[in-house]
Amino acid sequence: MSIQKYLYPPVYFLGGLGLIVLLHLFFPLGTIVPRYLSWLGAVLFVLGGVPAVLIFGQFQRAGTTIHPHAVSQKLVTDGLFRFSRNPIYAGMALSLLGAALYFGDLSPFVVAPLFVWVIQNQFIVPEERLLEETFGDAYREYKSHVRRWL
């Protein structure tokens, strides 16, 4: 089994958060957000965590898995999934953007787009392939009406 099977998205999120802190401390590249707006970053950071909490419960009630490498037992298309096929990942990206905004330096802002790129290539594309194999036309129909991110 490859190590990638053990690296779940929260590991990448925490790595991104650590990278934001390191960039802020050692390579700030100048302040671009005034300090009085840092509270907005804290709000976005917290709001980014809301989808994970809501969806974890939703998946438990639906009797399906939240693990990205496992086969889903049910296609969940309601709740936040009406607006995004990947609301947890979008929430993580929002939290990283909020952390960068909180610190206000230029360099931490590279982390959220990097996170999106990694998550899309390492998780979303394989997950969508698995969902299409598992649910066929039902997933393709859902995919045609709901955007990948937002």
Image (tube, rainbow, N blue to C red):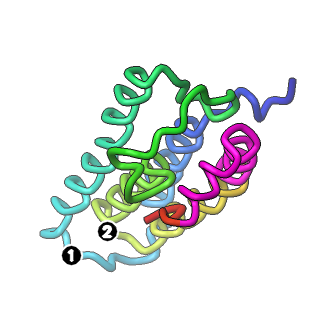
Q: Image quadrant of residue 38? A: bottom left
Vertical arrangement, residue 88 with respect to residue 36, above or below: above
Residue type at mark 1 is Pro
- Dot 2, crowdedness within 10 Å: few (<14), some or many (≥20)? many
Residue at 32% x, 45% y is 79
Vertical arrangement, residue 16 with respect to residue 101, above or below: above
Front in this rendered view, residue 100 or 47: 47
Q: Which residues are magenta?
A: 123-144
Image position, residue 60 (x, y; %): 42, 21
Q: Is residue 17 left or right of residue 1?
A: left
Q: Is residue 85 left or right of residue 79?
A: right
Residue at 54% x, 62% y is 148
Vertical arrangement, residue 53 with respect to residue 61, above or below: below
Which dot marks residue 104? 2
Element type where label 1 sits in the image: loop
**Mark before the other along the chain sequence, 2 or 1:** 1
Which residue, given by chain and number where applicable, does mark 1 sit on?
34
Q: Are marks 2 and 1 in contact (CB under 8 Å)?
A: yes
Image position, residue 54 (x, y; %): 31, 35
Q: CA distance from mark 2 to mark 1?
A: 7 Å
> Which quarter of the image is occupied by the C terminus?
bottom left
Element type where label 2 sits in the image: loop
- Dot 1, crowdedness within 10 Å: few (<14), some or many (≥20)? few
Residue type at mark 2 is Gly
Is residue 3 a member of the stretch shown in magenta?
A: no
Is residue 140 a member of the stretch shown in magenta?
A: yes
Vertical arrangement, residue 43 with respect to residue 51, above or below: below
